[in-house]
Image (tube, rainbow, N blue to C red):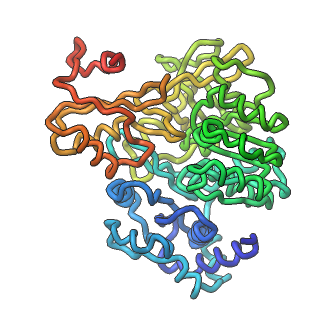
Amino acid sequence: MTYNELLHDARALGSLLSDKVGHCDGVGFFLEKSNIAVKGMFGVVYAGGFYSVFDVRSPITRINKIIETLKPAVILTDEKNKEKSAELVYDGEILVIEDLLKVAKEDDEKLAVIRAEALDIDPLYVNFTSGSTGVPKGVTVAHRSVIEFSEYFTDIFKLTEDDIFGNQAPFDFDVSVKDIYSSLLIGAKVQIIPRDFFSFPTQLMDYLVEKKVTTLVWAVSAMCFVSIMNGFDYKVPTTVKRVMFSGEVLPVKHLKVWKKYLPDATYVNLYGPTEITCNCTYYVLDREFEDSDVIPAGKPFPNERVFLLDENDKEVTSPDVTGEITVSGTAVVPGYYNDRERTALSFVQNPLQSKYIEIVYRTGDIGKYDKDGNLIYVSRKDFQIKHMGQRIELGEIEAITGAVKGIDRVVCIYDHEKKKIKMFYTGEADKKELMKELRVLLPPYMMPNSVTPLEEMPLNKNGKIDRRALNDR
């Protein structure tokens, strides 16, 4: 698909959808990543609304919770997912993009009126992440945040129209924002790697070589897939000159495999939650690391203030002293969609100054500085984890499991060393039947790696479940 085709089809879709989508209305997308999905996403933006992409592999019950929060003006799907979309609990219109494209026509006058009403603080997209109550949180990202980030991102890493991005991330994951909008800004090419290729290393490596990909902006889990499955032993994509990764900390032993086969590539660690528009810090790996080292999260992107707060909301500046990673700047999003209560917990007034309103995002991540002033990610402050490249609230898994018949109490803990989610429960539920039911209720990346039935939960002196005791089992 050429940019010219994208432009005209998106404008045509926007013209048609503007009769159904009002100013700053949300539109749900029930489809896989594809060229036609990009046309639809930008078509919604031309119509004056914002888009929210659903993971078609997620349980329908979870998607229905998202729909309940989003209350989309319409839902768009494609021919492939049309039949499955009928399972959604939604009383509005579900439209097939292919059908719309057959009849859509550009209306320059209508689009000009819509654009004249637009503000850079209007939402561009809403990505739903895991929520501790069992209800996913809709991170609302504004136009200006993506515009600014894309300009800095392409400039810092010297991306040009000659680059070819190998898109790994699904469109409901904000890693894909860097592929789509960086390329849109500079006129680069995007190769949308089929999702299934990340289960077949030979197909993946063949694809990267055949398409002459130069730039990878991938989740750490995807990089580990290549190294674990010995993909480079089969074929090396020698055109790759940038490897940028995020989502969780990349183990050095996997980095070494990549550097062995692509020694001349530039490697960059990117850090930042969805709530600050993709990333807030970066670190270019310009030295060797030992297997036991933690790769730094690095320094802030321009126009982003990243700092640490201690338990008394005082700034931490000394090396090796931990604090909560907090972010300020245009990158900070307006909050969680249709959820003021949870927004108020994380998006707060900067405690370091009281002279004017400055909303900062408290990430819940614990970090520290090294002797060179680089940020180092340490752990999560609460029970939110990074697992398989996804940010997961253990409380969401507990809430969903707790609703299963025969479950009295349930606790999930995360073994950071072994990268495993461990579940413990009390009740009459059969372990095998529970696992079978959870595969229907949970996305694959949220499935516990082990499930242990207990006669009773261990309690601490305060009468609360003793998670530390469970961690030792």
Q: Is residue 62 visible?
A: yes
Q: Is residue 299 visible?
A: no
Q: In the rendered picture of this protein, how many numbered marks are placed on residues?
A: 0
Of the pair 343 and 281, the residue shown nearer to us: 281
For the C terminus, the image quarter is top left
Q: On screen, 279 above or below 126? A: above
Q: Is 443 displayed left or right of 217 in the figure? A: left
Residue at horizontal 66 percent and vertical 59 percent from the top: 192
Where in the figure is residue 44, as x and y percent of width and height?
A: 56, 69
Residue at horizontal 64 percent and vertical 16 percent from the top: 317
Q: On screen, 218 above or below 57? A: above
Of the pair 261 and 267, the residue shown nearer to us: 261
Where in the figure is residue 378, as x and y percent of width and height?
A: 55, 22
Of the pair 249 and 210, the residue shown nearer to us: 210
For the N terminus, the image quarter is bottom right
Residue at horizontal 56 percent and vertical 54 percent from the top: 170
Of the pair 406 and 155, the residue shown nearer to us: 406
Quarter of the image where one finds residue 243: top right
Quarter of the image where one finds residue 253: top right
User: Furthest-front residue in view?
Assistant: 234
Quarter of the image where one finds residue 266: top right
Where in the figure is residue 186, as x and y percent of width and height?
A: 80, 57
Q: On screen, 31 above or below 149? A: below
Residue at horizontal 78 percent and vertical 36 percent from the top: 261
Q: Is 138 displayed left or right of 295 in the figure? A: left
